[in-house]
Image (cartoon, coloured by chain):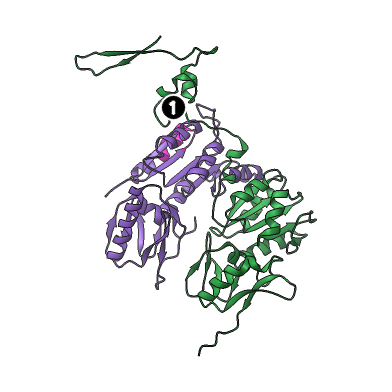
């Protein structure tokens, strides 16, 4: 039998109510209020989630880091050994244009998966490419910029830089790219010449990479071509002379 | 309808915390002050269903905190995961050190950084610049009121403030009450013939869009 006492309504100045119930089987280590305070043990119900007495759980576990939180904003994933390049990239990118995600080799795959639908750009230096990240780079139109020697797993359209200044200039150029009046909108999407906002990660990549493109199958770009035609932009996605998919002016539509 | 917006302040120094809380209270915000990260996490938890702070000010170094069981990184990670649209300013004496900046960015990729060595006045000035914004023909006054400049009519609601503070970003609202307030704000803008209009992106996501007009003030740098 277990008994607890609670103060009751103070109708006559003082009041106490007593309730009793059959206790659960007593464990070897009796739960304490301290455990309940952390949301564990038999007394947990006395300290409800979000209520007084309930202490919020926290942890410095790597999976809790904000950089791993799923997000649909345009993202630049920077993979390095120590994060120094990510700090510099953040300074190089115009404000509100993209979120910089600072990754290490061992968590780059997970962080890339949290960039929805995929990272707009991956920047790396002196690290190997994790298999999960390599798969994304192989299958999606991701701008890939690398400082120093290129590791295995980079796609054919990756750009390699030997000086940080050239890398930062290329990143800024991608952020500020304009093609036929189209340009990247802050945060996500592409603004057309008439002010219309088109959302689509593939189109963002094509605009930023122009005049270069992506060594990927044509089917990945069909939806972009359809959207561009629907909005009469005068541009379409097509394979160029180097067999990469890029933006090209579309043939004018003849109306009868 | 009035609803004062909350500001989360994590500062381990009692005197500085008082000063910051006083500053926001004078501007009619509701400051949620904490001297330890554990307390800040608790405040976020307690307010999760009723409100969401429009701004968080986080001291990175919590050496004087009465409770060291959690770190400022824990608070930043929680903000990044659960209150992504809340602007966050992190300040530190060591903000120039790349490893500090890297830790902050990994905890909260969108956090704005401020150098504590520039003094509290510099921080308050930056906060005021962020909160007293002009967007098209709207201006936030004292952080709590949206003023339509041509008519000087006022709209009081924290969700309206949130939209103006975040312009041009999309803001996700998390309750029916909040979305109703946002739609009322949209109707208010329409009724006043404002150059700013409310754009819905579905799934409780909204942003403000400004029709370009001659003489509209550019957004201030923050």
Report x, y in % for residue B103.
Answer: 62, 42
Queried whether the magenta region covers residue A219, the answer comes back as no
Quarter of the figure with residue B24: top left
Report x, y in % for residue B93.
Answer: 58, 41
Q: Main secondary structure of the magenta part?
A: helix
| Magenta span of residues | B10-21
Up-down: is B153 above or below A69? below
Report x, y in % for residue A236.
Answer: 60, 75
From this viewpoint, which residue is outermost toward the bottom?
A: A256
Residue located 40% across and 22% down the image? A46
Residue B143 in sight here: no
Queried whether the magenta region covers residue B11, the answer comes back as yes
Residue A37 in sight here: yes
Where is mark 1, residue-wise?
A54
Residue located 47% across and 22% down the image? A36
Q: Colour of chain B?
A: purple
Residue located 58% across and 62% down the image? A201
Up-down: is A42 above or below B146? above
Q: Tell which of A96 and A14 is nearer to you.
A: A14
Mark 1 Cα-neighbour bin, 10 Å: few <14, some 14–19, many ≥20: many
Q: Which quarter of the figure is the N terminus of chain A placed in?
A: top left
The answer for which chain carries disc 1 is A
From this viewpoint, which residue is outermost toward the top?
A: A1
Report x, y in % for residue A20.
Answer: 35, 12
Q: Secondary structure at mark 1?
A: loop
Q: Is residue B120 left or right of residue A205?
A: left
Q: Tell which of A79 and A170 is nearer to you.
A: A79
Q: Colour of chain A?
A: green
Count of numbered tags: 1
Up-down: is B66 above or below A6? below
């Amino acid at each position: 039998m277990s008994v607890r006492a609670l103060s009751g309504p103070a109708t006559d100045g003082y009041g106490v109510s007593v309730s009793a119930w059959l206790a659960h089987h007593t464990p070897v280590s009796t739960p304490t209020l301290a455990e309940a305070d952390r949301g564990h043990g038999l007394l947990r119900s006395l300290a409800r989630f979000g209520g007084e007495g309930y202490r919020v759980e926290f942890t410095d576990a790597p999976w809790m880091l904000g950089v791993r939180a799923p997000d649909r904003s345009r993202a630049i994933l920077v993979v390095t050994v120590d994060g120094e390049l990510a700090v510099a990239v953040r300074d190089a990118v115009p404000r509100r244009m993209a979120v910089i995600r600072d990754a290490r080799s061992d968590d780059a795959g997970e962080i890339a998966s949290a960039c929805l639908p995929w990272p707009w750009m991956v920047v790396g230096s002196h690290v190997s490419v994790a298999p999960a990240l390599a798969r994304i780079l192989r299958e999606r139109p991701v701008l890939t910029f690398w400082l120093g020697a290129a590791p295995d797993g980079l796609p054919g359209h990756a750009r390699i830089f030997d000086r940080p200044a050239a890398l930062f200039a290329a990143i800024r150029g991608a952020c500020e790219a304009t093609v036929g009046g189209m340009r990247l909108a802050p945060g996500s999407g592409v603004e057309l010449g008439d002010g219309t906002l088109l959302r689509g990660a593939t189109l963002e990549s094509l605009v930023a990479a122009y005049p270069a493109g992506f060594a990927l199958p044509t089917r990945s770009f069909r939806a972009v071509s359809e959207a561009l035609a629907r909005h009469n932009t005068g541009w379409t996605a097509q394979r160029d002379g180097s067999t990469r998919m890029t933006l090209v002016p579309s043939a004018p539509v003849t109306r009868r | 309808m009035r609803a004062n917006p909350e500001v989360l302040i994590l500062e381990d120094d009692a005197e500085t915390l008082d000063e910051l809380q006083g500053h926001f209270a004078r501007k009619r915000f509701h400051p949620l002050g904490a001297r330890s990260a554990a307390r800040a996490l608790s405040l976020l938890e307690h307010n999760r269903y009723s409100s969401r702070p429009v701004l968080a000010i986080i001291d990175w170094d919590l050496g004087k905190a009465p409770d060291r069981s959690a770190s400022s990184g824990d608070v930043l990670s929680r903000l990044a995961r659960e209150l992504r649209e809340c602007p966050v300013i992190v300040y530190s004496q060591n903000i120039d050190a790349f490893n500090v900046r890297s830790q902050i960015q990994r905890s909260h990729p969108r956090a704005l950084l401020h150098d504590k060595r520039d003094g509290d006045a510099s921080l308050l000035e930056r906060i005021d610049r962020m909160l007293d914004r002009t967007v098209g023909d709207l201006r936030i006054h004292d952080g709590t009121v949206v003023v339509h400049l041509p008519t000087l009519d006022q709209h009081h609601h924290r969700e309206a403030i949130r939209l103006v503070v975040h312009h041009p970003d999309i803001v996700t609202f998390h309750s029916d009450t909040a979305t109703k307030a946002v739609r009322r704000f949209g109707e208010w803008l329409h009724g006043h013939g404002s150059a700013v209009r409310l754009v819905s992106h579905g799934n409780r996501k909204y942003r403000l869009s400004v029709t370009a007009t001659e003489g509209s003030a550019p957004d201030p740098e923050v």
